[in-house]
Amino acid sequence: TRRPTLRSLLGLVAMVALVWGAAQVLGRWQDARAAAAIRAHSQHVDITLYTTSTCPYCAKATAWLKQHEVRWRECNVETDASCQRTYAEQGSPGVPLVRAGERWNLGFHVPWLAEALAAQSSPSGASSPRP
């Protein structure tokens, strides 16, 4: 059998690094596009993030929304009775719970949020522009 040479191993490492780098660039580009769409649609559709004070996923979601200057509202189910009631009515097993217009999702997922907002901002969507 042939043993791999140093040259072929370096070529393989270079190829892996190139693919990894391209995936990182693509991911950042997709995130930036989704953020721009979410930011634009958040002017027409309300976003509410139901959180708790100790939830690390809630903190990540909050940080993402702030970083991308998205219009949203936080509703802490531990400190606000109204938020607790709404959260309990949904029967969610955890947080963050995201409400985008009339759509709900357990967990903060940027692609879901972009899609939910776009669907409701369209002329056939459920939400109307804010005054």
Image: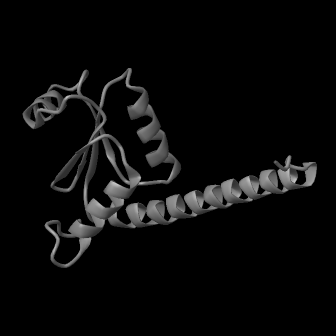
Q: Name the residue at 63% across, 55% down.
A: 24
Q: Residue furthest right?
A: 6
Tell me the quadrant of the picture where the C terminus can be found.
bottom left
Q: Residue at x 84, y 50 (%)?
A: 2
| Figure check: 46 above or below 81 | below
- Location of residue 26 in the rendering, given as x and y in whole percent from the top left corner: 59, 62
Which residue sits furthest front? 1
Quarter of the image where one finds residue 115: bottom left
**Number of numbered markers:** 0
Residue 10 position, x and y percent, is 86, 52
Residue, far bottom: 123
Q: Horizontal placement of 29 versus 93: left or right?
A: right
Q: Position of residue 49 (x, y in %)?
A: 30, 41
Residue 31 visible in the shown view: yes
Residue 131 shows in this picture: no
Left or right: residue 29 versus residue 2 is left
Residue 31: image location, x then y, percent: 51, 58
Residue at position x 41%, y 66% in the image:
37
Tell me the quarter of the picture where residue 86 sits.
top left
